[in-house]
Image: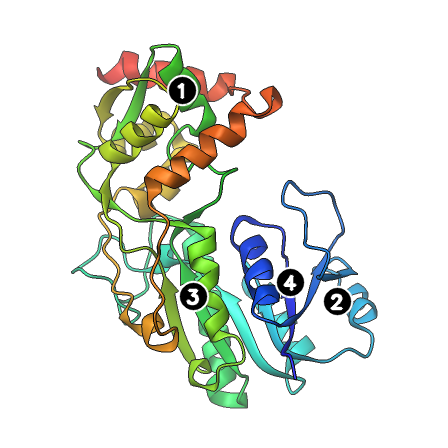
Amino acid sequence: MAKKVLFIGGTGIISSACVRSAIADGMEVFVLNRGKTSRRPLPDEARVLIGDVRDTAAVRDALDDLDFDVVVDFVGFMPDHIETDIALFQGSVGQFVYISSASAYQKPLAQLPITESTPLANRFWEYSRDKIACEALLNAAYRDKGFPVTIVRPSSTYDKTCLPFLGEWTAIDRMRRGLPVVVPGDGTSLWVLTHHEDFANAFVSLLGNPHAIGDTFHITSDELQTWNQIFLTLGHAAGCEPQLVHIASDSIAKTVPEWGPPLLGDAAHSVIFDNSKIKRLAPGWAARIPFAQGAAEMIRWRDEDGARRVADPTVDAAFDALVAAYV
C-alpha cells in the first residue's frame, strides 16, 4: 500500500521538489496550504487541501477524517507553530518530519566537517535560534510522549527561481551593466549549494522509514565552492565577466543591517558537511546536479520573461553605498 503523506506547505523551493519526488516514488501525496497561486505549481497527482496552517480550526476542517502515515512541516518557524503541530498530530501519525535549518549549527564553527552532532547555537540570527527552539520542543515531545519526529536540516538549497547570493537578481543586473558587485570577506570561504531536486531525492528515503524516527539528518551537496567561484559562475552564465569587490562581512552588516543576520549567522562561515548519515538511509544517493548547471537554469529562467528581471533600486543603492564606503 502506498504511503499516505501530508505536506504542510508544498510550493516552496524545497517542498515543491519533495512533492514531485514523493509522487514519483509512488506515495499518495496531500498538500495543505492556502491555495494561493505559486510560481511552482503542484503536479496534478497531488491532492490539495485548502487551509491556513496558522488557524487550527481551519486545519482540522481541511483534514476532516483523513489520516496519514507521514506529515511533513515545511513552514514551522516558531515554537508556537510546533506546539500546534504536536497538538494536531500526537497519536495520529506514524512519523512527523520537521524541516529545520543547517544555519542552526553553531557560528562560528568550532570544527569541520559539520555533522548532525555539531552543537546548535547562533547568536547572530533570530531565525536560526527559533529553529533551534522548535527542535528542542520536538525532541522533548519525542522523549516524553513518544512523538515520532524526524528532523531534517537543509543548508542553502536553490531552484531555478532562486539566486542564492548577496543582491540576488540585482547583482546579476549590475554584472551585465559592468558595475561592481559586493562579495563578503575575501571571497575564499567555502560554501555549499544544493539543487532542490538533489535534496528531494534523498529526502523521500526518510519518509515512512522507521530508522529515521527520533533522529536528525542534514542533506546537502558535497560540491564545495568559494564565494568568488559562485559569483563568477553566475556571471559567466549571464554572459558577462563580473567585477567583484571584497568587503568585510562586519562592514556589510554595519552598512546594510538587514543583511547582517543571515550573513554573520550563516554565509560568512566556511561550511563542509558530512553527509554519510543520510547516505546510509538513502543507498546510492549523491547530489548529481553541479552548480554550473543550476546557475544556467537560473539565468535561463529569468531571461525567459522580462518581469523576472527587475532590479531592486534599494539593493542597487546599497551596493553603491558599500563600494563608496569601503573600496
Q: Amino acid at mark 1?
A: Ala
| Disc 2 + disc 1, Cβ < 8 Å | no
Q: Label 4 to label 3, Cα distance in Å? A: 19 Å
In front here: 232 or 132? 232
Q: Indicate which disc residue 202 carries.
A: 3
| Disc 2 + disc 4, Cβ < 8 Å | no
> How packed is label 1: few (under 14 Cα within 10 Å), some, or many (20 or more)?
some
- The residue carrying mark 2 is 56
> How packed is label 2: few (under 14 Cα within 10 Å), some, or many (20 or more)?
some
Q: Label 3 to label 1, Cα distance in Å? A: 38 Å
- The residue carrying mark 1 is 318
Q: Label 2 to label 4, Cα distance in Å? A: 13 Å
Quadrant housing residue 154? bottom left
Query: Could you tell me which quadrant the C terminus lies in?
Result: top left
Pointer 1 or 4: first along the chain: 4
Using the rendered image of the protein, determine whether residue 294 is visible from the camera's viewpoint.
Answer: yes
| Disc 3 + disc 1, Cβ < 8 Å | no
Q: Amino acid at mark 2?
A: Thr
